[in-house]
Each structure stands twice: as C-alpha cells, then as structure tokens.
Image (cartoon, coloured by chain):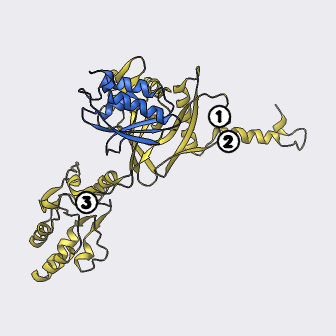
Amino acid sequence: MASEKTKPPNPATTVRELSQLSSQRLKLTLRGGEDGLDNPISSPRIQKLGLALAGYIDYLHEGRVQLVGRTEIHYLQTLSAADRKTAIKQIFARKLSCVVITSDLKAPPSLLRNCEENKVPLFKTKALSSIAITEISGFLEEQLALRTTIHGVLMEVYGLGLLLLGPSGIGKSECALDLILRGHRLVSDDMIVIRKFGSDRLMGSGPSDFRFHMELRGLGIVNIKELFGISVLSPKTIIDIAMDLVRWNPEEEYDRLGLDERQYTLMDVSVPLITMPVAPARNLATLVEVAVRLQMLKSQGYSPSGEFFKQLDARLKPPRSSSDEAWRL
Amino acid sequence: MIRKTLRIKSELGLHARAAAKLVKLTSQFESDIKLSRLNVEEQVDAKSILGILLMAAAQGTEIEVMIDGKDEEVAMEAVVQLVNNRFGEEK
C-alpha cells in the first residue's frame, strides 16, 4: 500500500485568500480594513450578524465570515444615530475575520469606521445573501479541507474515479496509458493531491504544475496532453474505488470468489479497495475496466458474485422431491 | 523510519540526470523512500523520477529524506552519499 501522510487540520486560511475569490456569481470588493487582510478564517460556516447587532453576541464566532444583508441594514436604519453606533460598536468586542455586505447595500459609515479601527476587512458584493453564502462557504470548504498527497495514478474510468496504488515500477503508468487509449481520462500520474470533500468523500486532483506528464520506462517523460489531447484529461474527480497493484506472489491467497469487501481509508473516508495481483498475461487495463463495471453494479445494489452464490446455495439444498427444479440440469 | 535533511549542492540543482541517478539508486532498496522540500507537506516518492522532478529542487534547496523499511540504514547512507557527492558529476 502506498504510504500516506495526513496533515493535521488546516489551521486556517486568510481573508486575503478569500478576497481573491472571484467567480461569475460573486465578486468581492474591498471597502476598508485593509490592514486585517491576514486575519485567519478557521471555519467554512458563514454567520449573519443578525441578532448580534441587537446585542446578543454570545454566538458571534471568531474566525468566521460575517454577513450583513438587507435585514441587518434595515434594522440599523430603524435605530437612532446613537443606538446605531452602539449596536455596531458592540460586535467588535469579538475579533471578527471580515464582514461582507451583500445585495450592493450601502455600508453605514460607523461600520466602515469600526472596521478600519479594528482591522477587520469590509467587503461589498452585488450578490444576494443566499448566493454569497453558497459561494463563500463552497470556497472555504475547499480551502479548509483536510489535504494529503499520495503516490499513485488517478483516472476517471466510465465516469468513476479510480485510484491506482502500488509500488514504483509495478506498471501503474503503463496501465493508465492503456486506459487512456481506451478512451478513459487521466487526472494525475505520480503525485495526487487528495482533499476531504464534505465528511464522506475524497476529491483527487493533480499538483498545479507538470500534472499531465507521465513517465514510461523506456520512453522517458511524455506529455499526455500533447500526445492525446484535452479530451483524455480531467482536472479532478471524486474517488470511487481504489486498486492496489501487487506483485504476484504464489504464496499469497488472492480473492478468488469476489465476496471480500475491503476498504481503503484516507482521512477517515473509506472507498472500496481491490487488491490486484500483477503477472504476465494479465491485461491490467481490461481487469480495471471490469472492476469498475462491477463497482457500478454494486453501487446500484447488485452483487454479481453474491447472485452466483445464491443460485449455488439453492442447488446445494437437499432435494424435497426428485422433481425439484434446482436439480434439473 | 529515519529522516535526514540534506542540502542540494550541485550547481544545476536536482535536474533530470541527477534525478535519474537518484531513482536508479533508490530503486535498489526495498524500503519506502520519500522526499519533500524542508517544511513542505507534499511528499514525493524517491523511486519515481517524475515525483523528484516535480520538487524542482534548485541548488541550495534543503530536502528531507524519509526512509522506512528493512534496509533503511543502508539506503539512507547511499542517498546521503550520492547527494553530498553532487550526484557524481562535478569536481
């Protein structure tokens, strides 16, 4: 099994990273508090300032992005100038990461002033609160996800993410090349960056540079993108199945029945694992394709080998009469 | 598991030929051999040339060598020697 190294939970990302988030649906413009751009963000969860402005700041969390929407702005407008100042001032008793004003609303001057004084970046966006929440938390989930790198090959086979593991020189790259020729897609060869996606999935991608290269013994380093084009590449995939390639060892017992269910676990997430012995005359790419097809059946609740043994069990039952159907060949 | 920090002294850094030599050496050992830049979490397999090249370790870069397995001591000694000898290329 390829060894792995899991980084302890990412301590935090920074507001500066967030400020670079610019998608089609959300653009953040910095309005003030630039000195706080290195403030940490430690949770992907977004808070709406809401009740905190009314004085209930017990649940105001440090390390989260604070959102100000229509509700907050309209509430502040109902207050007298003096009350408004107090309402805004009190939330800065906590060390806030940053504040985002949505729906292109106008920032109250005292909010801007407090942000400057307390080094809390203040952003504005045209997006509605609902969209800002989805976009920002999606971005932060990815930034704050647990991450690890492993050695292997990641492919997309029939649309499922397949992780090929095994020692150097066993033929992972050659197998990947075969799969590419059969129309499957390469995500990364050699070094794979894996992020925990939500609580129960693994998302794999390649390193940012050189990721569409492959080393083939006898040919050297080749560029898959140049040789086969963009259609055989995939930037990232959820990992659905892992296959460990091992040298054929006559002493070892391999799964002969297909009833064993083994798991590959990384960062507390498990995916089905197949141990595949490699030997001459075993066409790996074909075996991989079949393994993925089996996985597709299994994920729909059908186990082909289970079905076989159910039929066999029926035949092995003692006959009730000679005309028992199970005994008729 | 043993680890050691080494500095790349050769002028061209850990370039292609040097990486090839390193891979040739590490592949002779049974132990699991990993490299990383000092203080960088990403590890690469020292038996994979692509992985080593991905590190892009220039002259002066400090790399950490992590070896785990039966022949780890011998392997470490060999790796240290090769790196400190500037991959046997320069005088």
Which amino acid type is marked by label 2? Gly
Q: Residue at x 89, y 44 (%)?
A: A320
Which amino acid type is marked by label 3? Pro
Which residue reaches farthest right?
A: A322
Can residue A139 be seen from the camera position used here? yes
Q: How crowded is mark 2: few (under 14 residues within 10 Å), some or many (20 or more)?
A: few
Which image quarter holds the C terminus of chain A? Answer: top right
- Looking at the image, which is closer to me, A38 or A261? A38
Q: Colour of chain A?
A: yellow
Please, which chain is the residue tagged with disc 3 on? Answer: A
Looking at the image, is mark 2 or mark 3 earlier in the sequence? Answer: 3
Q: Mark 2 points at which residue?
A: A306
Q: Name the residue under label 3.
A: A40
Q: Name the residue under label 1.
A: A254
In the rendered image, residues at marks 2 and 1 fall on the same chain:
yes
Can residue A237 be seen from the camera position used here? no
Count of numbered tags? 3
Spot occupied by residue A142 in the image (x, y as percentages of width and height): 33, 51
Q: Residue at x 72, y 40 (%)?
A: A309
Q: Residues within 10 Å of mark 1 (few under 14, many from 20)?
A: some
Which residue reaches farthest front?
A: B91
Give the CA distance from mark 3 to mark 1: 49 Å
Give the CA distance from mark 2 to mark 1: 18 Å
Report whether A265 appears left or right of A50.
right
Which amino acid type is marked by label 1? Tyr
In the rendered image, residues at marks 2 and 3 fall on the same chain:
yes
Please, which chain is the residue tagged with disc 2 on? Answer: A
Q: Colour of chain B?
A: blue
